Every structure is written in structure tokens, then in C-alpha cells.
Amino acid sequence: MRQARIKIEGKRAVYHCMTRVVGGEFLLGEREKEILRKQLWNVAGFCGVEVLTYCLMSNHFHVLVRTPLESEIENMTDLELLRRAGKIYSADKVDFFKEMLSSEDESVSRNYRSNLKARMGDISLFMKELKQRFSIWFNRTRKKKRVGTLWAERFKSVLVEDDPFALMTVAAYIDLNSVRAGLVTDPSEYRFCGYGEAMAGSKSAKRGIRLLAGRRINMANALEQYRVVVFGKGYASKSANGKRAVDGDKAKKVLEQGGRVEMTEALRCRVRYFTDGAVIGSNEFVQSYFETNRANFGIKRRDGPRKLRGSDWGGLSCIRDLRNEVFS
């Protein structure tokens, strides 16, 4: 039986979403990642979600996004609606929408307006739109025409507290995917992630990094703060010889011996909390979600927060215990 999707309806919320290629096949090369990168930004622009960071790999991708208030969608002007439609539709299609929205038949304009708005703001609709659009492009561009699904079942999502420390911790985990895979030693060298794109000068990606640290902070300070989380204070890359500073087996051994892995090293492992923890944030944030959604949990459960194990995670908690290892 599928577990209910963890979501907060109608309010701003941040989600770490991850989805895999069917069968775990390595189907996404440089060209495919570039198209997916462009579609990610375009679909986000249409849906009205803020991309904080992302990472595109050969058989899966991660994205950290903030959804808008429901009222922002409801109160949207037709001019803004058409601007957003232009992110994913041709000029001819936008002109058609413009004609329909200004139709003298009020029922026609109302239906087109509500149908467009109904596809915006929600995290599930954003992921559906992105995955479907990329799948269509991918299948059409194969030398041997491809049919069928590209993605494996539903995407995973974790609700993340909209707090700078929680956001930067999860974002660093996402941006370090290429380091964990041994592709680079510094994520700024990987152009298919938010941090790498920001360091290359992309305004949209730089804005995402600034939003991690808070809207009031300037760009230079935001990048500096985020780099500290990614690398740790005084962290000099230990992997100049091509070897990662720590791996899952080493991390497990440290835990078995009763120790803890340094957070900057732990983030270079696959940490299952960030994909399977369901809700991540402070005790208060996790407890608040638990109390509001108590019906989704067993009747014997008394409270929500479960402490993240394996490292000093700065007070972060999750709502779902891990039955297996923290690191994989």
C-alpha cells in the first residue's frame, strides 16, 4: 500500500524531490542533461516554484524547490498567467491562450484561466509536468523510436523546514552528488547542479543559492555561507588523488564503533534521511507536522520527531525512522 504523499497544502513549503530512470539505466548523457536542465527552469517558471538547487545525474535527478502560497496562484493576473505560459509553450499557443482568456464568453475565459492555474503551485504537478515533458522529448529523439515510460514509478519527496540551516544542509547533500559519484572533487566543476551553475554565473542558480541563506542576505555572503556547509570550515579537498574523503562503508564502521562522522564528510555519503526521512527540520517543525497530520501515523505513536543518527546534524530531526543503515 502506498504511503500518503507528505505535503503542506496552500502554504509555502520546501521539498527535496528525487526520481530515477526506469531500471536504473544510465540513459542521461551530456545532451540529455542539458535539455533536462533547461526544462527544469522552464517548468519551474510556469508552475511558479522556486528552484533552490538541483543535481542531474546519469540515471536520476534531485531538486530542492519552494512552492508558493495558494493565494499567489488564485490572485494571478492574466498578464502573469500568459507570461508563465510562455515558459513552456510556443508564441502561437500563448496567443491562443490570450484569445481564450479575453473571450466574450465568460465561461470559456473562466475555464481556460482555471485550467492553467490548476497546473501551478503544487509539487506533484510540477514533477509530473517536468517528467512528462522530458520523457516526450527523450522518446522522440532516439534513433530507434522509443515508447513507454522513462521514469521509475513515483518520485520520492521529503518536506524540509524553510530554515537556512536545514535548507543549506539538504542542498549541500544534493549538490555533492557528483562528488559522491567520483565525477569531480568540487561540485562547482559539475555544470549540471545548482551550485556549479551558480558559480558559472547563472542568475537563476545564484538566486537559488541566495534563497537558501535567506532573502535578505547579499549574494556574496550567501555563496560564502553555503560553501562553508558544502566543504566545512578549513576543509581542503582530501580527494585530490581521486579518492573520496569518506565512503558509506567507512561511515558504517565509524557508527558501529560508537563514533560519529563529521557532517561535512557525512554529506559525501548517501544519507538515507535526505530521501527517506519524509520530513526534516527542527523538533518543533516535525512535531507541528505530526500534530496536524496525526491520522497518517499509527495510533500508538505519541510524538513526531526522531533524531537523525550518524553525525552531528545541528539539531535536525526527521519524522520517519530508518529501518536499515543511515549510510548506503
Image (cartoon, rainbow, N blue to C red):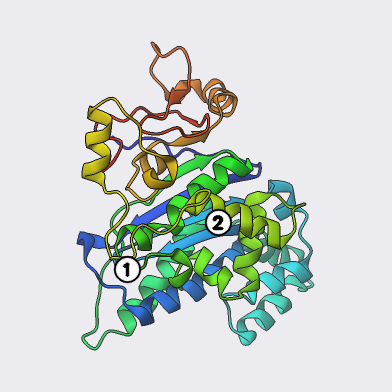
Q: Is residue 14 left or right of residue 309?
A: right
Name the residue nearer the viewer: 247 or 16.
247
The label on residue 61 is none
- The residue singled out by tag 2 in the image is 227
Q: Quadrant of residue 84?
A: bottom right
On the image, the x and y values in percent for residue 268 come to 36, 51
On the image, the x and y values in percent for residue 56 come to 40, 66
Name the residue nearer the viewer: 64 or 325.
325
Q: Residue at x 43, y 65 (%)?
A: 186
Quarter holding the C terminus?
A: top left
Q: Is residue 4 left or right of residue 24?
A: right
Q: Quadrant of residue 200?
A: bottom right
Q: Amino acid at mark 2?
A: Arg
* Location of residue 126 with respect to 108 vertically, above or below: above
Q: Residue at x 40, y 59 (%)?
A: 237
Q: Quadrant of residue 148?
A: bottom left
Q: Nearer the viewer, mark 1 or mark 2?
A: 2
Name the residue nearer the viewer: 140 or 227.
227
Quarter holding the N terminus?
A: top left
Q: Amino acid at mark 1?
A: Leu
Q: Residue at x 24, y 27 (%)?
A: 257
